[in-house]
Image (tube, rainbow, N blue to C red):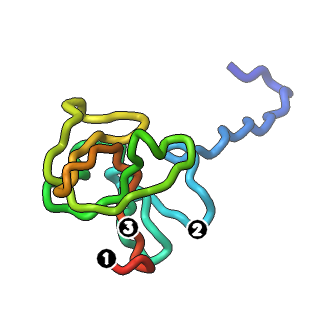
Amino acid sequence: MIEPGEALRPQPKAAAKSAGGFTAPGRKRTLSGRKLTAWGKSMIDGQKRSDIRPGMRVEIILKKDQRTGKRTVGIVRDILTSAAFHSRGIKVRLEDGRIGRVQGAPSEAQGN
């Protein structure tokens, strides 16, 4: 309750925060939480099983390449991770038999 003669003080505003955590400048998020490129296309980060389908072209990191971060491009034959989310990437088997964790979809510059 405000006493007579007491001045009203402005209340501090809460810090603005995006719904999905930190979003880099120039990037937008959809309501589903997927990141969008500057052109509005969805980026796949490889952590959600629902984003990955057999027959899809993806970039993976093979176990032997984990130290260097070298990426291998291929087409998904099987999804090996049973969990809906994996922080290091969903594990898949490519059509040529190689196994690795999905890091994303190849960019347009690499020539889908």
Q: Which mark is residue 112?
A: 1
Rate crowding at label 2 as few (under 14), some (14 to 19) or many (20 or more) other CA atoms within 10 Å. Answer: few
Give amino acid for label 3. Pro
Left or right, 10 with reference to 108? right
Q: CB of mark 1 within 8 Å of CB of mark 3?
A: yes
Give amino acid for label 2. Gly
Rate crowding at label 3 as few (under 14), some (14 to 19) or many (20 or more) other CA atoms within 10 Å. Answer: some
**Mark 2, secondary structure of its residue:** loop
Percent coordinates x, y for residue 27 in the rendering: 53, 64
> Circle 2 sits on which residue?
26
- Upstream in the sequence, badge 1 or badge 3? 3
| C-alpha span from label 2 to label 1 | 24 Å
Q: How many marks?
A: 3
Which residue is pictured at 14% across the width and 61% down the height?
55
Residue 34 appears in the rendering:
no
Q: Is residue 49 above or below residue 53?
A: above
| C-alpha span from label 2 to label 3 | 20 Å
Give amino acid for label 1. Asn
**Mark 1, secondary structure of its residue:** loop
> Circle 3 sits on which residue?
106
Q: Nearer the viewer, mark 2 or mark 1?
A: 1
Q: Nearer the viewer, mark 2 or mark 3?
A: 3
- Upstream in the sequence, badge 2 or badge 1? 2
Q: Is residue 7 above or below residue 99?
A: above
Which residue is pictured at 37% across the width and 41% down the height?
89
Percent coordinates x, y for residue 35 in the rendering: 43, 58
